[in-house]
Amino acid sequence: MIVHLLKTLLLSVKFLLMDPITNDAKLWEDFKKGEKYALTHIYYLYADSLFRYGRKFSSDDELVKDAIQDLFFDLIRTRAKLGTIDLDKFVQINPGVLAS
């Protein structure tokens, strides 16, 4: 268990040291390949922004948290079918989604 946690931490640190231009694409590809660090990293990068965005539609914190959990379950369940992402293009189309 501790070895697994250390390995995940090491992969996350390695990811953070990568060129920021390639980070999102690399992270997404690693997630699709089943790399465990990638799911954790995606969650920590976007959960707060998703929560703030969800609160625009509901004042029920637990409902918003459940929706985010459902989103991540769906991502895990369908990861083999997922395509590539262009986060910059997504943010241009939906500027308020990831805003602080």
Image: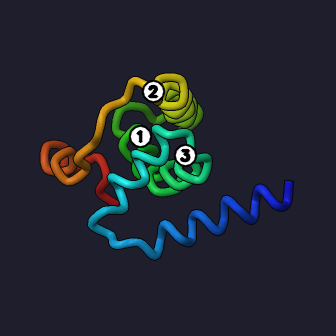
Residue depicted at 46% across the width and 44% down the height = 51
Marked residue nearer the N-terminal end (2 or 3): 3
Q: CA distance from mark 3 to mark 1?
A: 23 Å
- Looking at this view, name the residue that lies furthest to the bottom: 17
Seen in the image, is 89 located left or right of residue 50? left
**C-alpha gap between disc 2 and disc 3:** 14 Å
Q: Is residue 30 left or right of residue 66?
A: left
Q: Residue at x 53, y 71 (%)?
A: 14
Q: Is residue 22 above or below residue 36?
A: below
What is the secondary structure assignment of the residue under circle 3? helix
| Res. 39 mark | 3
**Residue at label 2?**
80
Mark 2 or mark 1: which comes first in sequence?
Answer: 1
- Give SS at disc 1: loop
Number of the front mark, 2 or 1 = 2
Q: Which residue is mark 1?
A: 55
The residue mark sitting in front, 3 or 1, is 3
Q: Position of residue 46 (x, y in %)?
A: 44, 51
Disc 2 versus disc 3: nearer the observer: 2
For badge 3, the amino acid type reads Leu
SS label for mark 2: helix
Amino acid type of the residue that numbered disc 1 sits on in the rendered structure = Arg
Badge 2 density bin: few <14, some 14–19, many ≥20, Cα 10 Å? few
Q: Nearer the viewer, residue 73 or 78?
A: 78
Tell me if I can see residue 60 in this picture: no
Q: Colour scheme used in the picture? A: rainbow
Q: Residue at x 49, y 43 (%)?
A: 31
Report the quarter where the C terminus lies. bottom left
Query: Residue flagged by tag 2: what amino acid is it?
Result: Ala
Q: Quadrant of residue 21?
A: bottom left
Residue 26, numbered circle: none
